[in-house]
């Protein structure tokens, strides 16, 4: 049996489309939140995880494709669906490579979206890769910091704000460290 989608985040700059899809999902019992920009969506996910992330490909301040890795990091277990009105095979391949589970064309039917997302959540994702422990005496501070951050992210389910609390540092500091370490 497929796992039901209970929560969703819709990231799209088209107000009419975003609110229409939100209403359709809510009528189907899904707690759906919205964001008009990539950054709004990322902030929303730091504080409330979701089962489904729907993100538009073309947005005015940063396209959805380049943000997929960040969304996947924050929500490793969520179904991530990229929507586009300009779909083609190379875009679908790029979206999957960057972290999307699938690419659907706009306009999207809410029932089809929920069926697809529930099916995607059932598929097992491989566990995050873990680096082998280096031999004693060969540890470097950057390596220790990287491993501590990865462990905190695993324990927090990929939620940066929670991982920062586990590490005893500010969320923004952790985000800077992630960028610096390339994690």
Image (tube, grey):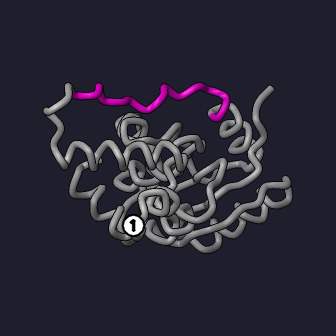
**Residue drawn 44% across the image and 61% down it:** 164
Residue 50 or 173: which is nearer the viewer?
173
Q: Does the magenta stretch include residue 127?
A: yes
* Vertical side of 128 occupied by 161: above or below: below
Asked whether residue 70 appears in the rendered view, the answer is yes
Residue 102 or 67: which is nearer the viewer?
67
Q: Is 84 displayed left or right of 77 in the figure?
A: left
Secondary structure beneath dot 1 equals loop
Q: Does the magenta stretch include residue 159?
A: no
Q: Where is residue 123 in the image (x, y as percent from the top left)?
A: 61, 26
Q: Residue furthest front?
A: 137
Number of marks in picture? 1
Asked whether residue 56 appears in the rendered view, the answer is no
Query: Which picture quadrant has residue 21?
Result: bottom right
- Tell me which secondary structure the magenta stretch mostly adopts: loop
Q: Where is residue 99 in the image (x, y as percent from the top left)?
A: 43, 41
Name the residue beneath numbered marker 1. Answer: 169
* Vertical side of 114 occupied by 13: above or below: below
Classify 10 Å Cα crowding around label 1: few (below 14), some (14-19), many (20 and above).
few
Q: Where does the N terminus fall, quadrant-wise?
A: top right
Q: Position of residue 146 (x, y in %)?
A: 28, 46
Range of the magenta residues?
A: 121-134
Residue 102 or 4: which is nearer the viewer?
4
**Residue drawn 48% across the image and 57% down it:** 166
**Residue drawn 57% across the image and 70% down it:** 35
Q: Position of residue 102 (x, y in %)?
A: 53, 38
Q: Is 59 displayed left or right of 115 in the figure?
A: left
**Residue drawn 49% across the image and 49% down it:** 158
Residue 135 or 22: which is nearer the viewer?
135
């Amino acid at each position: 049996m497929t796992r039901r989608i209970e929560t969703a985040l819709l990231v799209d700059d088209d107000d009419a489309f975003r609110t229409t899809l939100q209403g359709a999902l809510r009528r189907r019992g899904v707690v759906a939140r919205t964001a008009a920009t990539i950054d709004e969506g990322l902030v929303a996910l730091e504080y409330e995880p979701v089962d489904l992330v729907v993100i538009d490909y073309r947005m005015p301040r940063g396209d959805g494709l380049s943000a997929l890795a960040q969304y996947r990091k924050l929500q490793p277990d969520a179904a991530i669906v990229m929507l586009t009105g300009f779909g083609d095979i190379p875009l679908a391949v790029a979206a999957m490579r960057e972290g999307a589970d699938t690419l659907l064309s706009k306009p999207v039917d809410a029932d089809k979206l929920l069926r697809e997302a529930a099916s995607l959540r059932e598929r097992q994702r491989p566990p995050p890769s873990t680096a082998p422990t280096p031999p004693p005496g060969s540890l470097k501070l950057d390596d220790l910091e990287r491993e501590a951050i990865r462990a905190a992210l695993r324990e927090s389910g990929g939620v940066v704000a929670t991982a920062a609390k586990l590490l005893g540092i500010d969320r923004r500091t952790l985000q800077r460290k992630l960028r610096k370490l390339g994690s």
